[in-house]
Amino acid sequence: MRVLITGVTGQIGSALVKALCSVVQIIGVDRRQIDFAQPERIPESLNRIQPDLIINPAAYTAVDRAEDDRDLAFRVNADAPEVIARWAAPRSVPLIHFSTDYVFDGSGSRPWRESDAPNPLSAYGASKLAGDQAVRAAGGSHLIVRTSWIYAATGSNFLLTIVRLAKERSTLRVVADQVGAPTAARTVAEAVAAIIGGKPALADRLAAANGIVNLAAGGETSWHGFAVAIMKGLKARGVPLAVQEIVPIATKDYPTRAVRPANSRLDLTRLSHVFGTVTPTWEHALPAELDQLAGALVVKTAHLG
């Protein structure tokens, strides 16, 4: 099976390559090979590659910048997935497309189900929702995978931002009234690998899921709780940090250009019932990322010394 994976320099894309490289033939591309900012050129690339399955984690993810750059966000997150889906549908090529908790408004206190009505609060969320709708409208075999709070030991994410700040400052102020499940990119990749390799036929299982599934780590915490766990884990691994205190604050005390959902919990029932996949809790997944990060930090410190 020839599997096209987009965005291979991103967190999920690179994790997917590692998870799938031993079981399928991967054609990995980044923006140099397929530029999502130019959707009209995508069919030419797909005609050349002729994949049997497309996995599309590529996206415009600069949430705050999207408020002032809506056109580019919609080209990348909505127009490009539409082009891919319309290419794939008549050729019976399944498409696994990644979405986000930002399509919801974050209200309420229960986890969001796949069937809940979206109501994005930001340009980023609106662009991702438009992409979801375009993929569904194309009518092909597809699975929209909604994720939340993605992080990894590499890339650009909350984990690495907190570590950088913790090395510079004695006190950190972190939002405590936004709740979700920090989800390691490798957790997502391993779950997708299980989905692809399961039985019966992939198209039948995608149809059974009604073309959409939530995929996140189990459990829940706040950004503050996540930051505390990160610091505790790194200190236990001997990573030198300046931080002494992590102060919980409200969202209103940390204004951002784009509005974030307060409730990013995702209901994982469909993931378990349809695909037989149960993800680890965020607490169980975190140590592997901290081990990798701590090792990298020790090597860097030794090199600088």
Image: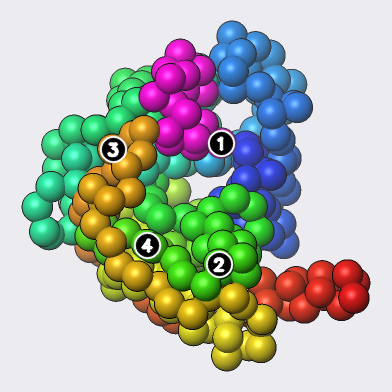
- The local secondary structure at tag 4 comes to strand
Q: Which residue is mark 2?
A: 169
- Which residue occupies the foreground of this view, 208 or 271? 271
- Which residue occupies the foreground of this view, 298 or 243? 243
Nearer to us: label 3 or label 4: 4
Q: Which mark is residue 174?
A: 4
Crowding near pointer 3: few (<14 within 10 Å), some, many (20+)? many
Badge 3 amino acid: Val
Of the image marks 1 and 4, the number of the one nearer the N terminus: 1
Q: Are marks 1 and 3 in contact (CB under 8 Å)?
A: no
Residue range highlighted in magenta: 58-77
65 part of magenta stretch: yes
Quadrant of the snapshot with the N terminus: top right
**Which residue shows up at 66% across the image and 59% down it?**
154
47 part of magenta stretch: no
Quadrant of the snapshot with the C terminus: bottom right
